[in-house]
């Protein structure tokens, strides 16, 4: 690399980027060293104490080139030292918080990165009642450290890839080499390495590349901000993807049943954990089918209901000017507005929004005769059931199928409702994730894998890893 051209290039950059600082330091009678740093991503204390302090103690009668270079390497106390070979690497190191030192024909980089993250806090999107309360941050090294703090194993492999022509984001792919199948980790690494894009802002941008299922709304990748969850998935033989500036981690492969599991299930008694999983399964189907079933029965198949209940429904809807399907869509649309508004509203304003929504849905709309009380109950039960799931992707799939079943029921009654359910089951069973059925271990039913599917056994009795995830080191007690 031509040093003169490099120095000119840096001064040119400085004209448009005033945050770049270039110091020219005399290190001999006729020689100079250049110290270059981006003050917005570097720690000024580290630059002053480690780099500039070293040069201030050197005599202007410098030693020969070789001795001076060794002195720089040996005396600047930076744990991460890199030799810079080209301009592209120089720019990447500079904007990653490294201090660039140019002396004679040598260009080197020393890590003086500043702390720009928010620190380790409690999970915000996955509230924790029992269990570890730390969560991932936007700091890549801290995220890897939170995982290594729990998995102190020489088998935990970290493969680093740089993605994005402009962002040059550092992406880490982690897996347990003695557990994870080679085909799985090779496919994930190959997929990430093949991404050719100008920039990636968050690890969730990779879902579109890893997820090969384009004809379904069900997510086949899972994201989490909880390190204990990530370590549990790694010990099952999965691959995780983390990225600089992203507070969440992707897990692959992901199956349908994973969205009904929670890390707190393993910190409670088996009976309580199993009970909550059953509740989640019931809630999933209640959230999807309740409005559609009500529409089908009230619109076409009233004879299914007892006479007293049918008369009650008729009296409630006597003054409502809209058909049942329009009434349901009005309520659902209003709920969607409230849900999105509440998720985007600052916490100190959420109470006002909740009160406003309760007054509109619970009292004013009914009193005005626009909505029947029974429809408020039906939509409320369906909406509350969907809120049990913390992952936004699974909530999105519930919304899609809920609206689709409502339309089918409004058009064809019970026949349309049953047909919609069949399409739902067919769609679930047709999905594959990394070549394996999405509905494992329920469909196809794997008897030996039911110890931690819906009903959870005692931790001491879960002695094997899921066979549909890995064939290596299946016995948990033996990891050699």
Image (cartoon, rainbow, N blue to C red):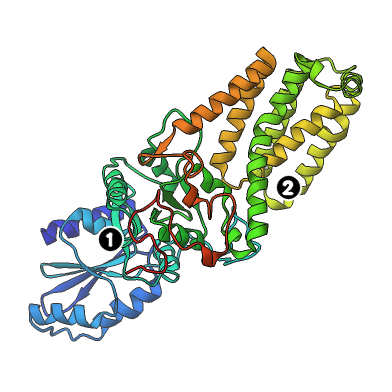
Give the structural element (helix, strand or loop) at label 2.
Answer: helix
Please give the label number shown on residue 350: 2
- Residue at position x 22%, y 67% in the image: 82
- Residue at position x 31%, y 61% in the image: 158
- Residue at position x 53%, y 55% in the image: 451
Which numbered disc, 2 or 1, marks the residue that appears first in the sequence?
A: 1
Q: Mark 1 points at which residue?
A: 93
Camera-side residue of 413 and 404: 413
Q: Is residue 216 above or below residue 446?
A: above
**Image location of residue 258, percent across then percent down:** 52, 48
Q: Nearest to the eye among marks 2 and 1: give it.
A: 2
User: In which quarter of the view is residue 71 placed?
Assistant: bottom left
Q: In this view, does 21 lie above or below 297?
A: below
Q: Residues within 10 Å of mark 1 (few under 14, many from 20)?
A: many
Q: Residues within 10 Å of mark 2 (few under 14, many from 20)?
A: some
**Image location of residue 412, percent across then percent down:** 66, 13
């Amino acid at each position: 690399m031509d040093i003169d051209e490099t120095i000119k290039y840096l001064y040119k950059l400085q004209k448009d980027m005033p945050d770049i600082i270039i110091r020219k330091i005399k290190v001999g009678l006729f020689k100079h060293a250049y110290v270059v740093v981006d003050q917005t991503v570097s720690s000024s204390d580290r630059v002053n104490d480690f780099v500039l302090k070293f040069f201030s103690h050197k005599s202007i009668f410098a030693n020969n080139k070789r001795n001076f270079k060794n002195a720089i390497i040996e005396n600047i106390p930076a744990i991460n030292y890199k030799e810079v070979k080209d301009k592209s690497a120089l720019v990447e190191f500079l904007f990653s918080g490294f201090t660039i030192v140019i002396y004679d024909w040598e260009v080197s980089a020393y890590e003086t990165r500043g702390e720009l993250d928010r620190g380790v806090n409690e999970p915000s999107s996955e509230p924790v009642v029992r269990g570890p309360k730390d969560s991932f941050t936007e700091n890549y090294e801290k995220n890897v450290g939170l995982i290594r703090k729990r998995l102190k194993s020489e088998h935990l492999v970290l493969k680093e890839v740089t993605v994005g022509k402009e962002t040059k984001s550092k992406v880490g792919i982690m897996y347990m080499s003695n557990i994870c199948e080679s085909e799985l980790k090779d496919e994930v690494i190959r997929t990430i390495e093949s991404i050719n894009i100008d920039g990636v802002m968050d690890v969730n941008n990779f879902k579109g590349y890893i997820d090969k299922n384009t004809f379904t709304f069900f997510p086949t990748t899972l994201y989490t901000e909880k390190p204990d969850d990530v370590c549990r998935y790694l010990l099952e033989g999965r691959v995780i993807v983390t990225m600089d500036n992203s507070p969440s981690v992707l897990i692959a492969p992901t199956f349908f049943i994973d969205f009904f599991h929670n890390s707190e299930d393993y910190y409670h008694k088996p009976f309580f954990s199993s009970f909550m999983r059953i509740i989640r399964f019931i809630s999933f189907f209640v959230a999807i089918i309740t409005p559609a079933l009500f529409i089908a029965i009230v619109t076409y198949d009233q004879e299914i209901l007892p006479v007293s209940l049918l008369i009650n429904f008729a009296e409630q809807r006597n003054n409502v000017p809209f058909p049942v399907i329009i009434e349901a869509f009005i309520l659902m649309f209003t709920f969607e507005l409230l849900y999105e508004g509440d998720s985007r509203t600052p916490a100190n304003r959420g109470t006002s929004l909740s009160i406003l929504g309760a007054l509109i849905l619970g009292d004013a709309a009914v009193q005005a005769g626009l909505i029947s009380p029974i429809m408020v109950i039906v939509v409320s039960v369906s909406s509350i059931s969907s809120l049990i799931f913390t992952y936004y992707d699974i909530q999105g799939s519930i919304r899609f199928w809920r609206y689709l079943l409502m339309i089918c029921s409004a058009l064809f009654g019970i026949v349309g409702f049953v047909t919609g359910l069949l399409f739902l089951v067919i769609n679930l069973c047709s999905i594959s994730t990394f070549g394996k059925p999405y509905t494992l271990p329920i469909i196809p039913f794997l008897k030996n894998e039911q110890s931690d599917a819906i009903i959870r056994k005692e931790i001491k009795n879960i002695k094997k890893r899921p066979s549909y995830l890995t064939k290596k080191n299946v016995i948990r007690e033996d990891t050699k």
